[in-house]
Image: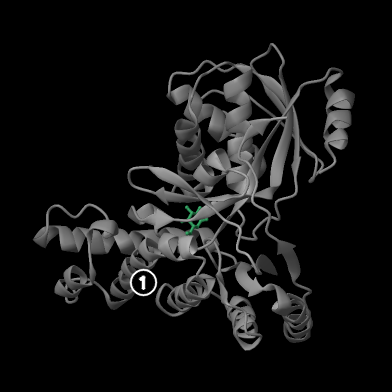
């Protein structure tokens, strides 16, 4: 990232200089759509991030410039000051969520940019929220801890963006650690760092470069299905608060009380939560072939049961299988974006060549490839 471009723009717009903060996007090895069900996830922060130059301006107005889009916005921080531009809503939302939690925030000037690809399932929006959350917390000495910053980012999605997301993305962006994945219990927010250095393998993302519309409403609908099933199970088992507390037997009991669609969604989630429990032990043993098999299982579940895949992602998954890639699956919310692939070193070149050529031939779009590098979370530079 060309930080000096951000700094130069800041100087030319605001005739002063500020401080630079950053927060990254994330990958997730396995554990998809489990976070809002209280289950486990295994994400890691990556070397693609959002960066902002920021300084209080002594007024009540935020003056913000999105360098990648060449767009400017000005807004106040009152309850009724929601800006029109979608990127500005994230910054405003973070401020509002902090104010709701008792913070005093005044106006500031900022220029931001990033290299997290948009709509690729790598959490560019969480990176933006966490970058500003961390920065504003620091410049106004607000003393929110990283847990609260992650929750502030998540609440921004819920209340100002309209996506009822879980906590995984913001947590990974705030808590990322170089070289480690994070095994996060999304209910208690207990977490452990799991060193990830798969000898003999590479982790690579292949971006379909498509984002299907309505992804956010489809996402919210999935979450609603899970909640419907929990409500049904709870009638028989009052202790069940989230699908995390259920199992396949409890699900079967309510087969006639929920819609077939809700049933199959919940079945996927319960299976996925279970899959996750086994993974750290395999990682510890260095058994990446089994980890990879589980990734394929996740893909099949996400595609056929949870129905958040798309032809482009399924195509890349098939290619991975045909090339002998150890593990491959759709990553993130779905409906486009990337597959994440665990591939033996010696198969890497052949797989990438075949994935690019055959995808381009079929969909007339050149996919993008990113080698995953696990990096630190939100920080001041
Ligand atoms: C999106 C959401 C996350 C999570 C994933 C699916 O990235 O923001 O909270 O639900 O989808 O695992």
Q: In this view, does 153 lie above or below 253?
A: above
State left or right for residue 208 relative to residue 231: right
Q: In terms of secondary structure, where does tag 1 sit?
A: helix
Q: Is residue 275 above or below residue 108?
A: below
Position in image of residue 20 (x %, y %): 74, 28
**Which of the two residues, 18 or 180, is positioned nearer the viewer here?**
180
**Which of the two residues, 311 or 4, is positioned nearer the viewer here?**
4
Q: Does residue 230 show up? A: yes
Quadrant of the image containing the N terminus:
top right
Badge 1, how many Cα within 10 Å: few under 14, some, many 20+? many
State left or right for residue 240 relative to residue 371: left
Residue at 45% over, 51% down: 183
Q: Does residue 85 show up? A: no
Label 1 sits on residue: 268
Position in image of residue 357 (x %, y %): 79, 83
Residue at 72% over, 15% down: 57
State left or right for residue 219 relative to residue 310: left
Position in image of residue 228 (x %, y %): 26, 62
């Amino acid at each position: 990232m060309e930080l000096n471009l951000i700094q130069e723009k800041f100087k030319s717009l605001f005739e002063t200089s500020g401080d630079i903060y950053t927060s990254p996007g994330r990958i997730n090895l396995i554990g998809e759509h489990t976070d809002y069900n209280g289950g486990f996830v295994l994400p890691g922060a990556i070397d693609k991030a959002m960066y902002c130059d920021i300084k209080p301006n002594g007024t009540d107005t935020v003056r913000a410039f999105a360098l990648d889009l060449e767009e400017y916005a000005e807004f106040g921080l009152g309850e009724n000051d929601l800006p029109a531009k979608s990127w500005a809503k994230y910054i405003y939302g973070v401020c509002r969520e902090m104010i709701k939690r008792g913070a005093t925030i005044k106006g500031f000037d900022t220029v931001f940019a990033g290299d997290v690809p948009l709509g690729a399932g790598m959490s560019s929006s969480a990176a933006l929220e966490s970058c500003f959350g961390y920065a504003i917390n620091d410049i106004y000495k607000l003393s929110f801890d990283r847990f609260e910053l992650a929750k502030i980012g998540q609440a921004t999605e819920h209340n100002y963006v309209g996506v009822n997301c879980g906590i995984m993305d913001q947590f990974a962006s705030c808590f990322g650690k170089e070289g480690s994945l994070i095994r996060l219990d999304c209910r208690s927010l207990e977490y452990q760092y799991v060193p990830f250095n798969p000898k003999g393998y590479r982790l690579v993302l292949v971006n379909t470069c498509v984002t299907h519309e309505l992804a956010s409403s489809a996402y919210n609908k999935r979450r609603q299905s899970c909640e419907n099933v929990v409500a049904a199970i709870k009638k028989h088992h009052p202790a069940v608060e989230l699908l995390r507390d259920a199992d396949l037997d409890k699900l079967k009991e309510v087969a006639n009380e929920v819609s077939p669609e809700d049933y199959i969604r919940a079945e996927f989630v319960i299976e996925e939560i279970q899959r996750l429990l086994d993974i750290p032990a395999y990682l510890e043993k260095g058994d990446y072939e089994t980890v990879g098999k589980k990734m394929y299982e996740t893909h099949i579940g996400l595609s056929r049961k949870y129905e958040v895949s798309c032809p482009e992602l399924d195509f890349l998954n098939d290619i991975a299988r045909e090339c002998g890639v150890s593990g491959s699956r759709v990553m993130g919310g779905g409906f486009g974006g990337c597959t994440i692939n665990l591939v033996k070193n010696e198969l890497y070149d052949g797989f990438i060549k075949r994935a690019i050529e055959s995808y381009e031939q079929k969909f007339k779009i050149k996919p993008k490839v990113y080698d995953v590098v696990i990096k630190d979370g939100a920080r001041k530079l």
